[in-house]
Amino acid sequence: MPDLDLPRGAVLALWLGATAARPAGSPVPTAALRGVQGDDEPHEVVDATGSRLDLADALASWTAPDLDVVALLPAPGDVAGVPAAVSAQALDAREVVLLRSAGRSLALVPEVTGFGSALEPGHLVTWHATEVPDWTLAVQGLGTLEDADRGLRRGLTDVTDALVRLDVAHWDDAHATQVVALRDAGVPTWRLPDRLDARRGRILASAARLLAIVDLATRDDGGAVNLWQADQRTAALRDVDRLARRALSAATFAGPAAGPGPQASTPR
């Protein structure tokens, strides 16, 4: 059974939210570094002055009881909540992590450089940290976990109905096999904090699954036989893509500004 992929920024935000209450000076959990970095080379963080930190030191410096954090996944035409100072970079990376603590706000955008071969790929990742204005009010419009949960269920029904009504819910054999596999796929638990609450975990998995299915569906026009059908199919997929990206962001939002609700517990 394949694993669902999560953006690096989403995993980083989840771990920051889970470790925010650690005692000052305590070491960063090995599981956090492993979860965020995965199979990448060790990550670096670079600030506006060019100073470099390894990810462990950066995580330790961001730890604070009042930490607010969220990962956003912008797309062309949808950069809601992304600070203007980093909107171009975030759109290029298709992700950004926002932090706020002690009145200071940061935006972290990953720069990913691939190397190696298709059989043995590797990635160098540098997080560029930029100071930005307070972003907490701007992301409130993305909705709560409850909104995300309802929206994912409604969105999947709406897009399925639309594609069937248009008679373009068609998959070739190769893509159909991948969709069936994705239906039962899960998020790899080793990348996530321990005892992540059930609703948050379910939303993460559902959103990641929908994003993977949309990615497959947008590789061709399905069973569309004219331009109108192709446009309607594209619009339906774009709607569910936006809904899934925002739901995934809602699942990463943690801290005082996120309001009451279950949070990830202290990790191992």
Image: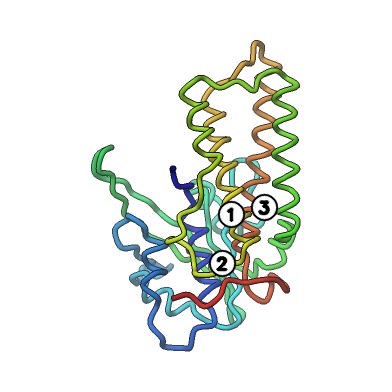
Q: How far separated are the C-alphas under marks 1 and 3?
A: 19 Å
| Residue 221, horizontal then vertical, whole percent | 58, 20
Callout 2, which amino acid?
Leu
| Residue 96, horizontal then vertical, whole percent | 53, 57
Q: Which mark is residue 80?
A: 3
Say which residue appears at 55% left-offset and 47% top-offset. 208
- Locate the C terminus and report the quarter of the image it occupies: bottom left
Closer to the chain start, of discs 1 and 3, is 3
Image vertical order of residue 221 relative to residue 138, above or below: above
Say which residue appears at 60% left-offset and 41% top-offset. 210
Q: Which of 79 and 39 is in front in this view?
A: 39
- Locate the N terminus and report the quarter of the image it occupies: top left
- Residue count near mark 1 (Cα–Cα under 10 Å), binned few <14, some 14–19, many ≥20: many
Q: Residue 196 carries which label?
A: 2
User: As drawn, is 151 to the left or to the right of 108?
Assistant: right
User: As drawn, is 2 to the left or to the right of 263?
Assistant: left
| Residue 171, horizontal then vertical, whole percent | 56, 22
Displayed quadrant of residue 44:
bottom left
Callout 1, which amino acid?
Leu
Please, what secondary structure does the residue beneath circle 2 have?
loop
Q: How far separated are the C-alphas under marks 2 and 1?
A: 11 Å
In this rendering, does residue 187 appear at all? Answer: yes
Please name which of the two marks, 3 or 2, marks the residue nearer to the observer: 2
Q: Which of 98 and 206 is in front in this view?
A: 206
Callout 3, which amino acid?
Ala
Please name which of the two marks, 1 or 3, marks the residue nearer to the observer: 1
Q: Find out whether the residues at labels 2 and 1 contact each other: C-beta distance under 8 Å.
A: yes
Say which residue appears at 73% left-offset and 37% top-offset. 157
**How was the colour assigned to the protein in this rendering?**
rainbow
Please name which of the two marks, 2 or 1, marks the residue nearer to the observer: 2
Say which residue appears at 40% left-offset and 77% top-offset. 28
